[in-house]
Every structure is written in structure tokens, then in C-alpha cells.
Amino acid sequence: MSLIFAKTDSVHQQNIQKQSVRKIFILLTICLVSLKLSAQKINEKYQYHIKKATGEIRIDGKLNEAEWQRCETAQDFWMMTPADTSKANCRTEAKFTYDDNFLYFSAINYQAKEAPYIVESLKRDFNFGRNDNLWLVLEPFNDLTNGWVFGTNAAGAQFDGQIGDGTNLNPNWDNRWSSQTSFDGKKWILEMAIPFSSLRYKAGETNWGMNLSRLDLGSNEKSTWAPIPRQFFSITLAYTGSLVWDNPPPAPKTNISIIPYALTGVSKNFEKGEEGAFRKDIGGDAKIAVSPSLNLDLTVNPDFSQVDVDQQVTNLNRFELFFPERRQFFLENSDIFNSFGGAETQPFFSRRIGLGTPIQYGARLSGKLDNNWRIGVLNIQTSANKDTSVGLPTYNYSVFALQRKIFSRSNISMMVVNKEGIGFGQENAKKGFNQYNRNAILQYNLASKNNVWVGKIALMKSFSPEQTTDDYTQLVDLAYTTKVWDLNLTYTRVGDNYRSEVGFVPRRGYHYLSPSAGYVFYPKKSDSRIVSHEPKLLSFMYVNNRQDVPVDVSLSSDNTTTHVFAYNLTFRNRATFDIFLAYDNNLLFSSFNPINPYLKDYYVKNRSEHSWTSWSTSFVSTPRTLFTYSFNSRYGTYFGNGTRLRLNAQVGYRFQPFVGISFLGEYNDIRDVNLLSSKDNKPIVAGASFWLVQSKIDITFTNKLYWTTYFQYNEQISNVNLNSRIQWRYKPASDIFLVYSDNYLPSDLGIKNRSIVLKWNYWWNI
């Protein structure tokens, strides 16, 4: 059954909308009142007392310096999975010390039995769930909201990342630090040194939030030093213990880092018949510590050619897909800018900047003003697109965000986003570009002391030339998570004229309601192969704001209802199995091709209604074995009384720790869909089948020298992509890259475009 608003006058519709939002606001208010606002940390009693070293420490993974023997030992970790009610079986002994320049950390990680460690490779920023590893979580400001992760796997591959909103990890953040590991068959030893210049902290503060998270795949055990309930991530800052200093750590010094780069290469567009273009660029970034907790990032003529290529996916809807930001300049404190809005209503999405046009220069100020206030300011200048047929003008992008902490972990935030055309003319306007687009956002972020309640309320308004009414968006999102209950309710209304050209808003003019409820069962038998199983009900409902939407509004939302029953099984060896049963109903408000939205030969007409049922399954094997595999499938009816079959399988093998190989194949088969021909508007029964094939080879010669090659074949968009990258990290955060990329036509492997780039950068601390 489709969800359709009855035809009412606009005033009555607005009253209904206001009443709906008011009810949800009241619900959130009740939740707020019920929160415990005590300032004391949950794990306050877990304290490690760190003392200053009196001698030299060498980072060699051996721990044979006398300094380590003087240190207090953090041990008796708590098991987090497969259960969170007892001490960990795998013993871990961790220690801290420091001198005038470095924070030192070491850990002896005993295995349950003598056996080889389990890791994917030596590549940086590995997957936590697929490696024997240990992470150090630091939260110097004790705000239970923002922090850092530093860690390695058992083979010595490094991982670092930044935590925002209390639990959201950004693994693409990188900084300067060093580490070394060793292994003797029974235990692996980690030793690391983190420069104080790589951290942000308040001068004179002698109590930092801290936790340790360890995964031992041989025993399928995840553990933490300060206990965390199993339903949360092991980096959840609400449950940190304390790192207590004997004296305040060294006062932050004036910290300036210059990161220049030089690049050479050649590229050629064969499709346009262009001559090869020789590249020789220089540019760079600078990081300046304005205060111990406030950082200024500067960039001039930045280049991002070394960033990992996006993984291609099959897209069977007419709306844009989301790909995460990976460019280093935009990553530090990115949560200040990116936490606004929801999954499909992000008013700021940094990947919009520099899309189709180069960035000339930019500045970015972000961090803490004090324990309660955070700020983010960004200004980026781009060049006009040199391709006159595109006509993309020069734009300036400005963002201002301010965040005020309230209660124990919640905050109120506001942000203003401005995209302004420079030297904007009539020719630009004729090609459909706006001279400016602006957004103003006010948001409340809820996070209870124990992280059981999280959510947000947001109001967003846009400003564009010739814009009239209904140019706002409102969002309410509330989640309640315990060991057994997983409840969520999301409501969004996006106005017909809401526009966010620097955001990610793939559709507009709709109401969205999504409730979900799950309950987790835990077998009572301690030797059960199943750790947990969870039935879950989910609904996703999009309802167009109006019933008189014209045919050619490309971003207008359809009336779409999806109801899903899901069941998840998690096994003791960390394998998972899921089954889904779904019912879909779609009332279209524009014509599109459901077989392949990129092709316009056939279409389903607007105002047509389609319903179907489908089922799908998914299985992911244990990460403990050298050979891993997964599969998922989907079968059911489809648009136009057709059918759709999707089969997806991935296999991988690792010659640990040096080589990892993976191969993914996805096949879609769509049949017997009733369509109209775009040539003569006559009915036709059509179908299509297409493959998506991906392979990845990771060769990690050492934990500083990597060679990664991607091969991707996407039949849906008729493209074959080859991307190969060699990275040598010759010094911490300093690299040499060699990147080769090709795109081909799949029919005859005719070359579309080709490029090869050699890039050098160096992290220089002044």
C-alpha cells in the first residue's frame, strides 16, 4: 500500500506538519529530562598514573629499557565480546611514560595459545575486525566527545584516526608518530612514541580520558581496559578511564608544520582526441597551532592524485550515491562541519568543493576555544573550469560552524555555508549555474551520559537567487540502544525549494519517516556457536510534499514505502548471517529507466504505481582463516511487473602479512519489465543483465612500502578502470607516490583516458 497524503489546502498541510514535529520534539524533551546530568565519568575509578621517564627509550618493540620496569601496569582487561560480563581471557599488560617530547606507550599482548598471529597485511589504517591488534584511545580534553586513536596490528601496521561525536571514527586522518612490534609465537609486543606536537591538549591539565581496545582473533575475544557494554563500539568515549599525570605534560609549544609537495606526470584524454598533457605542479599545506587546541590548516594549489580510487557500485535508482571524503586537508576536526543533518540531508559535504574545477588555495580553522566551545571556519577558492563547454565559474566557499557543549555530552550547534560566484556573468547563468547558494543550520545533538540515548534535531534553511517559499528542511533523529533493545526513529521533511549546492541532498520535496526496532537474544549456553541473534523490523517511507509535481523535476522524490523484516545471526568465530524479507511500493513522480538509470532508451512513466516483494540473504565468513569469503543475494519482483535477481560474492586470500588478494563479482539480471520506448512511446517488455567486477591486490613489502592495484569492470556504465599505486613512507607522514590510472571501454578495451603521476611530499616541523 502506498503512503499518499490526501489533497488538502496548504494551510492544513502545514498544520499537520507542525503537529507531527511538535510531538517528536515533546518526546525528545521528555528524554532530555530523564537523562542523568552528573558530571562524573562512568569509568572514573579506572585510572593509570603516568610518570616521567628519567632515561632514554628506544622504539624497537623489545621493552628492555629499565624505564619500563618503573611504570605502573594496566592489566585485568574486561571482555567486551563474545560476552561483557567477565574479565578477558587473553592477558594484556600496558604501560605509559613520557619525556619532554613524546608520550610513550607499550603493551605485551599474550595469546590464548601458541599460534601465528592473524593480520590482513602491513598496510596502514587496517580493518579493526580483521586483525589481531591493539588501539590506544586518547581524549585529552575529557569532554567524552572528541579524541584520537593510535594503534598497530600484530605485524606492525599502523592505524590512526580521529573520533568525533563520541563514537564516530574517521580513519583517513593521519599524523606523525612511530611504532615497532615484535612476536615470539606466544605474545606480540607493541611499543610506540607519539610526539606531543601531534596532539591537541590543554596546558596544565593532569587528567586525560584514555582507554585501550584489543582484538584477539585466535580466541575471538575483544577486550578493553575500562569496561564498555558490548552493544557499543570499543572506542566509545563515554566509557573512557583516566590517564593521570604526575605533573602536567609539557606545555604545548608553538607548533608549525609545513607540508610541501612536488609532482610530475602526464595525462591524456583519448575520447576527446586531446594531446598528452605534461604535469609539473608544486604546492603544499601548512598546519599551525593557533592555540593548544585550535589548529589552522592552509593549502595552496593542493593535489589529491594519491587518494584511493572510489569503489564502483551498481546504482538502480535515479538519485546520487554517497562517497566519503578522503582528502587530508578536509579531515581534521571534520565532525564540526559534517555532523549537521542526516544521511540524505547533509548541508555541507566537502567533496562538492573542487568537483570539476581545481582548488587554488584555502584556509581552515578548527578546534576548541575552551572545554565548552568548538569552532570551525573554512574558506576555499576554486578556479573556473577551462572547458568552455562546461562553463563552471569561479566559486568561493565559506563555512562557519560553532558548537556549545551542554549537559554531560550533548551540544547545540549552528553553521552557515556560503557558495559565491566570483566574476559571475550572464553566460554562467544561461548554463544553469547560480551566482550564490547559502545555508543556515541550527542543530541540537543529544548524547546521554551512558550513550544509550543519542539523536539530533535540526532546522536548515537555504537561500538562492529567485528562490521563493518552502526552502527549509527539518530533521529529528532519536536512537535508544541497550544490550537487548535497538530502537530508532527518524523523521525528515525537505522543502520543495531547499537547495544545498555544497551539501549532499540527492532528493527534495518530501517527508521521510523511518522507524526501526530490534531485540537481541543471547544464548545461555557458554559453548554455543551462536553469540547472538536479532530479529528486526524496519520501514523507510518517502512521501512527496505535493500531488501536482511536474514530470521533469529530476530531484523530486517519489512516494516510496519499504517494509523489511530482518534476522541476524552472529557466530562465535565472528561470522555473520542475515536474511531479509521486504515489501516495496513506489508511486513515481517522474519518468525513469529502472533497468539502467544511465540509459534513456526506455522508461517507466510518471504517475505509475509499482509494488513488489523480495528476499535477500547475506553471509560473511570468519576473518580468522587465510581464505575468506562472503556472499549476498536478492530475488523478487520489480518495477513494471518484472523480476530482479542480484548475486554478489567476494573471496579473499592473504599470504600474511605481505600479500592480500580479493575478488568481487556482482551480477544483476532484470527481466520482463513493462516499459515505454523513448523513441515512439510504445509499450515494450524489456530486461537487462550486467556485471560489476572488482579485484584488489595489496602487496606490503614493509609497513612503510605498499603497492595497491585495483581493477574494476562496471558493465552498467560501460567502464573498465585500472588504478595502481605505490607508496613509500620514507619518514613519518612523508611519502613518495607513483600512481597509474586507466579507463577503458569494455567492448574493445579502447582507452578513454590515461594518467601517470609521481608525487613527493614532506612533513617538516618548524
Image (cartoon, grey):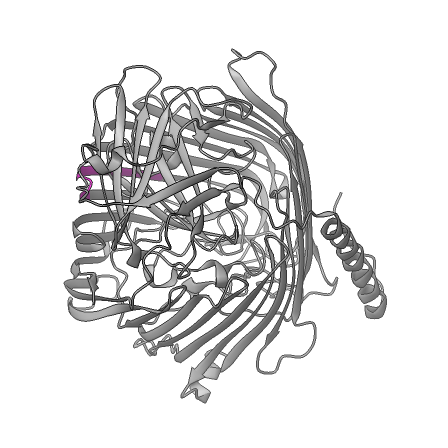
Find residue 467 and report its horizontal and vertical position in percent: 63, 79
Q: Look at the image and tell me whether residue 496 can be seen.
A: no
Which residue is depicted at the point 28% across and 38% down?
696
Find residue 705 and report its horizontal and vertical position in percent: 16, 44
Whether residue 694 is in magenta: the answer is yes
> Viewer-proximal residue, 330 or 56?
56
User: In which quadrant of the rendered view does residue 66 lie?
Assistant: top left
Whether residue 252 is in magenta: the answer is no
Secondary structure mostly seen in the magenta stretch? strand
Q: Is residue 751 left or right of residue 167?
A: left
Span shown in magenta:
693-706
Quarter of the figure that contains the C terminus = bottom left
Which residue is depicted at the point 41% across and 64% down?
293
Q: Is residue 724 left or right of residue 82?
A: left
Q: In the image, is residue 12 above or below residue 101?
A: below
Find residue 451 and report its horizontal and vertical position in percent: 60, 44
Q: In the image, is residue 583 above or below residue 628?
A: below
Q: Is residue 681 left or right of residue 290?
A: right
Q: Look at the image and tell me whether residue 424 can be seen.
A: yes
Find residue 576 and report its horizontal and vertical position in percent: 49, 25
